[in-house]
Image (cartoon, coloured by chain):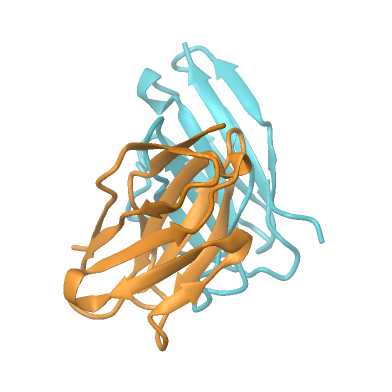
Amino acid sequence: AQSVTQPDIHITVSEGASLELRCNYSYGATPYLFWYVQSPGQGLQLLLKYFSGDTLVQGIKGFEAEFKRSQSSFNLRKPSVHWSDAAEYFCAVGETSYDKVIFGPGTSLSVIP
Amino acid sequence: EAGVVQSPRYKIIEKKQPVAFWCNPISGHNTLYWYLQNLGQGPELLIRYENEEAVDDSQLPKDRFSAERLKGVDSTLKIQPAELGDSAVYLCASSLNLGHNEQFFGPGTRLTVL
């Protein structure tokens, strides 16, 4: 069965510092991969997705993610974090374009001035 | 363009009482999803619809949960009777169709069962 792990439950970074959120999945083929962000009291918003092609994908709000098949990872990065980036981040995986999406447990990001 | 609308935003009920949540997806979106999100966890799919048809309800606890999407537009999720463990956020999402995974989420309904 598919599974998604996000090893870091909580991360704190200083504003302006770089950020990397880790995501690992368990699935044999190349899955459909997503990163979503959830601000307090809000629904989830898609940051970026990977289906095929270039393994480095660009998303909204200055985020990018890199798919590494050998490591079964899809880590999210941002070169310079803003205070408004404080939120919960979820990695998600789908087996096919028609399959349901499985969400990881999330990483909570705090940003200190 | 209006997003996914959910109501109510918050609901507090006594255990064993019934409760219903409503969702109106983005116009033109054929696929609708209901998720359960417990505190500190990611969303878990309860049911997904393609138009009026429930295409995946394997995770829906059918002894107490029910859902409908009668005209293939808005949807209602019901719990009867509610239990203490049902306290969570119930998220609704929609996408263009089953083969288009980009989901758009509503703000959720936070349910507290006392």
Numbered-mark total: 0
In which quarter of the view is residue A15 placed? top right
Which residue occupies the foreground of this view, A81 or B86? A81
Observer able to see residue A97 = no
Report whether B83 appears left or right of B10.
left
Q: A54 above or below A22?
A: below
In which quarter of the view is residue A113 placed? top right
Q: Which x, y percent locates residue A101?
A: 39, 62
Q: Colour of chain B?
A: cyan
Q: A33 above or below B88?
A: below
Q: Which x, y percent locates residue A11?
A: 37, 38
In what quadrant of the picture does the N terminus of chain A appear?
bottom left
The residue sitting at 42% across, 46% down in the picture is B43
The residue sitting at 43% across, 59% down in the picture is A77
Q: Which x, y percent locates residue B58?
A: 33, 55
Q: Which x, y percent locates residue B87?
A: 44, 24
Q: Which chain is orange?
A: A
